[in-house]
Image (cartoon, coloured by chain):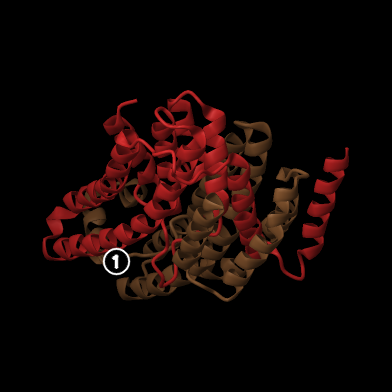
Chain colours: A brown, B red
Amino acid sequence: MVNLIYGTKNKEDTIMKEHNELFNTHPYMASYIIGATIRAYDEGKTSEDIKRFITIAQTSFASAGDLLFWQTLRPALLLISVIFGLKFGIIGPVLFIISYNAFHLFHRARGITDGYNKGWDVIYLIKAKRFIMVQHVFEILGALFTGLLFILIAFKINYLLLIPLTSLFVILLLRRYSATFIIIAVLVLIVIIALV
Amino acid sequence: MNVFVLAIIAAIILLDKYAVGEFGVSQPIISGTIIGAIFGDISSGIFLGALLQLIFLGESPFGGDIEPDGQAAGIIGTGSYFLLVSSNPLEYSLFLAIVFALVGGIIGGVLNMYAHVYNEKLYRVFMEKKHLLYVCHFAGLVTAFLRGLCLLLPIFILAHIVTIPRAFPQLTKELLMIIGLSVGLSNGLYLFVKKSTILYLCGGIACSLLLFVL
């Protein structure tokens, strides 16, 4: 990316030497920081200031990305994909692959330009209407399709088991038991049900 | 299907989890479809992948706990199901495949932790020898691939050779559906239902009932 922007090998080497620390942020949000960093170099900011910006930005974008992508957008799209997959077959997985990749690739590309245009102010984008609206839309979709999961049930006596089992898992999640504990609980449950 | 070839394909799919792009290919519903297509039974692949997806819907790679590897669980579940069902009855195969998937998911989470430790070592090597940047990056990719292979290959071999005794527990598709739906519902309620979205949940339930009646 650096080589692409500057086209000079020397500049690339200098920047590579300055940024060889661990960089840990959300993978889909990294482009915002890259864009803003390129702008900072263009404006001739000092490498110390740039490093300070990166340290702050990577944490902020990591938590924003986790909330937007891992906790909202991806599970909502997966839920839609599961319902379509179980009802209509291959349409479900195809729908997920297209919509999810379109969204995050657009986001990654847009991050470079937004980061460059806004410079260090890009950090305020996290609280921008665009992000909050997208998150809210996918929360709504997630809630709607959680309700629509009921179209997968059948009118059979066995399906009454859904009530106690769902209640049990909701309680485990609300009491913040670890994911490993919940998976072990599912495993034990499957063994018990299979034995009975 | 050769078990080794399947394990290599599956380990490549699993690279999507961290090492290559994160395009969502390793999500259980997608990997289930791919493995189903390899074995010539896409609908069973989608069914198993979808139900494992519901179980691992809330998975997110952050936080202090060792997170079970939902992507690996999806691949193990569908892969071992197709290997088991070729020489065992469906209900027994389904039960064992799901057990393999859930146990494999937990082991995958632990292996993930070791892969992180190894990657940190690679980072320290890079800090001492800066010219090894590309070597360290490639070594990280190889680590991710080998992590997948070490996890998947033994389980697939076991699934390929095992003959399930008749006294073994059975799991029907209906029971698996009930368990998957209950975990999926609870994950959905936990992730999405707030004061501002509860109306949409009710709307979804109402639509389901309407579609049911119609």
| Side of B49 where B208 appears, left or right | right
Where residue A63 appears, as percent x and y from the top left, is 50, 69
Q: Residue at x 62, y 55 (%)?
A: B184
Q: Quadrant of residue B7?
A: top left
**Which quarter of the rendering shows the N terminus of chain B?**
top left
- Looking at the image, is B159 positioned above or below residue B113? above
Where residue B98 appears, as percent x and y from the top left, is 47, 47
B187 or B122: nearer the eye? Answer: B187
- Looking at the image, is A53 positioned above or below residue A108? below
Which residue sits furthest front? B167
Where residue B53 appears, as percent x and y from the top left, is 54, 48
Q: Disc 1 sits on a residue from what chain?
A: A
- Looking at the image, is A175 positioned above or below residue A182? below
Q: Residue at x 48, y 54 (%)?
A: A112
| Side of B64 where A94 appears, left or right | right
Q: Name the residue that disc number 1 marks.
A: A22
**Which quarter of the rendering shows the C terminus of chain B?**
top right
A73 or A83: nearer the eye? Answer: A83
Res. B22 in view: no
B14 or A124: nearer the eye? Answer: B14
SS under mark 1: loop
Give amino acid for label 1.
Leu
| Side of B61 where B3 appears, left or right | left
